[in-house]
Image (spheres, rainbow, N blue to C red):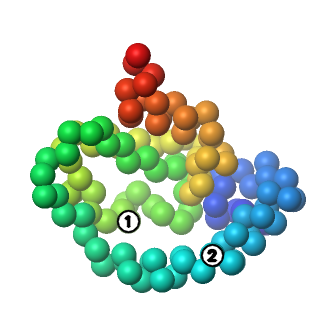
């Protein structure tokens, strides 16, 4: 089924959405060059960031597994780690409200 790797619930995608996603990935000329350029890069802190940082993983992600995530030990100590239930690799498709709440909570907008 189209989208089975990207989404936790690919059956929710309309045929048009599934076609669009597959076409966009297939035609993305920058993916492989970008992947090759960054795969060995490491985060290097030159100063202690003060901005809030959230690293969120989709609990149903079948592509980027949390246990395989590299270099999370180098993130700022105040980094918040979050597992997003019901979300796959493209969490905006599976859990748009959760994504919005997470962004608002991270930026402090939700607290205002």
Q: Quadrant of residue 27?
A: bottom right
Residue 35 image point, x, y percent: 45, 77
Name the image quarter holding the C terminus.
Answer: top left
**Left or right of residue 23: residue 6:** left
Q: Tell me which residue sits at (40%, 18%) in the image.
A: 111
* Residue at horizontal 71 percent and vertical 50 percent from the top: 9
Q: Position of residue 99 (x, y in %)?
A: 54, 39
Compared with residue 92, is residue 22 higher up or lower down, i.e. above or below?
Answer: below
Residue 28, numbered label = 2
Question: Disc 1 designates what residue?
Answer: 68
- Outermost residue toward the top? 112
Say which of 29 and 97 sits in front. 29
Above or below — where is 14 with respect to 20? above
Asked whether, in this view, residue 49 is left or right of residue 52, the answer is: left
Front residue of 62/90: it is 90
| Circle 1 crowding by C-alpha within 10 Å: few under 14, some 14–19, many from 20 | few
Which image quadrant is residue 98 in?
A: top right
Residue 60, which numbered label? Answer: none
Q: Are marks 2 and 1 in contact (CB under 8 Å)?
A: no
From the viewer's perspective, is the residue at label 2 or at label 1 nearer? 2
In the structure shown, which secondary structural element does the residue marked by tag 2 occupy?
Answer: loop
> Which quadrant would the N terminus be assigned to in this image?
bottom right
């Amino acid at each position: 089924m189209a989208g089975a790797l990207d989404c936790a619930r690919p059956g929710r995608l309309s045929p048009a959405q599934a076609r669009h996603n597959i076409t966009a990935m297939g035609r993305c000329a920058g993916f492989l060059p970008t992947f090759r350029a960054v795969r060995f890069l490491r985060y290097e802190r030159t100063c202690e960031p003060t901005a809030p940082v959230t690293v969120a993983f989709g609990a149903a992600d079948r592509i980027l597994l949390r246990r395989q995530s590299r270099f999370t030990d180098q993130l700022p100590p105040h980094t918040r780690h979050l597992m997003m239930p019901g979300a796959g690799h493209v969490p905006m498709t599976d859990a748009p409200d959760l994504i919005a709440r997470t962004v608002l909570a991270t930026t402090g907008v939700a607290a205002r």
